[in-house]
Amino acid sequence: MVAHIDLDLAHAYHPDPQQDSDYALLPLKMSFKAGGAYALLGPSGCGKTTMLNLISGLVKPSHGHVTFNGEDVTALTPQQRNIAQVFQFPVIYDTMTVAENLAFPLLNRQMPKAQIRQRVGQIAEMLELNSQLDQRAAGLSADAKQKISLGRGLVRPDVAAILFDEPLTVIDPHLKWQLRRKLKQVHQELKHTLIYVTHDQVEALTFAQEVVVMTRGRAVQVGSAEALFERPAHTFVGHFIGSPGMNFLPAVCTQQALQIGSATLALPAPLAQQLAGTRSLKLGVRPEYISVHAQPVPGSLPAKVLRWQDLGTSGLLTTECDAGVVRVRLAGTVASQWQVGETVHVQVMGTHSCFYENEEWIA
């Protein structure tokens, strides 16, 4: 049965954790819906592989429990949980053919041979391995071997969940987008619960319906690609999602105005009321949502042009105001019209601007 997975746990490799830094995974409550496609996204060491291993049963949580469809599975092995896991490097039998590798998990479960042939054929077709079914795995490229490893994870029809730990690391870059597309297609067809660990935001945002963004052992936001981009719940999400990430400028709210460096920007009364009394306030705005003007406009800051870069489909203008650096993504022809050293006015206040207190979104 496809699993609905609930976590209510924390994990520390330290025997007697006393502070946040002693935990690999800080206390959290999280649910993964049956049949959903999720990504755990974050930099190395943030706890995403630890979370995956707690779900699979390779690691037992030091605090709390894991449930599948309401049943406590904390003490169960990966086999008892009926989990398939695909690792960063291929786990296959080199002496077997591609077909034998794909069939092996089904043979272990004593599935009838006719059903095995049908299932192996179905998965091979999905992953475009049909022409290689009779080849020995030993002679294949790293890309093909990892596709076999993916196939072995996908081949069992009764699996509760399939967990992927950075499975495209060894894949050539030009093939990665094909396999991401294939995995998304496979999920739509098979409806398994899929959880995918990656540090690559493109992989996470193109594959998953919901992305869990993690940093320093903490899940700071769970949401769709659009939610993570439009309204980051934490400044880390703003930094990590996007290329380049969100601009952040320290600000002070005074009556019905926002003080950013030496500039004073008017605030609508409802927003001023929301921000009144805040401390450690930051304005966050994505480079895509900033416009550049020769003269002051409402919501703009004076800034000096440091450089512009041609990115092909767009241009990146880097400016500096007295509160910090502001990066702006513009059409290439627009970005190139501004000269290095010139003073411009960057409009940072608008419908997409976000406000943060103590690194968390407030308005």
Image (cartoon, rainbow, N blue to C red):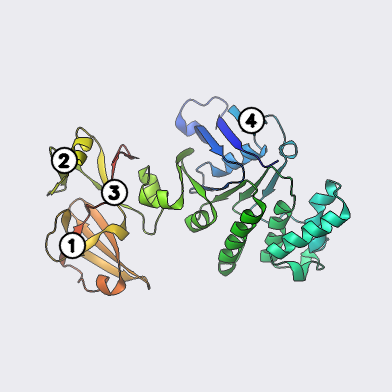
Residue that numbered label 4 is attached to: 70
Quadrant containing the N terminus is top right
Which mark lies nearer to you, 1 or 4?
A: 4
Can residue 93 be seen here? no
Instruction: State the residue at coordinates (61%, 50%).
Output: 165
Q: Residues within 10 Å of mark 2 (few under 14, many from 20)?
A: few
Whichever of labels 1 and 4 marks the residue nearer the N terminus, that label is: 4
Q: CA distance from mark 3 to mark 2?
A: 19 Å
Q: CA distance from mark 2 to mark 1?
A: 30 Å
**Residue type (three-letter) at the residue carrying disc 3:** Gly
Q: Position of residue 38 (x, y in %)?
A: 55, 47
Marks 3 and 1: CB-CB under 8 Å?
no
Residue that numbered label 2 is attached to: 269
Instruction: State the residue at coordinates (23%, 65%).
Output: 306
**Residue type (three-letter) at the residue carrying disc 1:** Lys
Q: CA distance from mark 4 to mark 3?
A: 40 Å
Left or right: 226 with respect to 276?
right
Q: Residues within 10 Å of mark 1 (few under 14, many from 20)?
A: many
Whichever of labels 2 and 1 marks the residue nearer the N terminus, that label is: 2
Residue that numbered label 3 is attached to: 284
350 or 178: which is nearer to us? Answer: 350
Q: Residue 145: which quarter of the image?
A: bottom right
Whichever of labels 4 and 3 marks the residue nearer the N terminus, that label is: 4
Q: Circle 3 — which element? A: strand
Q: Position of residue 323 (x, y in %)?
A: 20, 50
Quadrant containing the C terminus is top left
Left or right: 39 with respect to 190?
left
Q: Which label sits on residue 304? A: 1
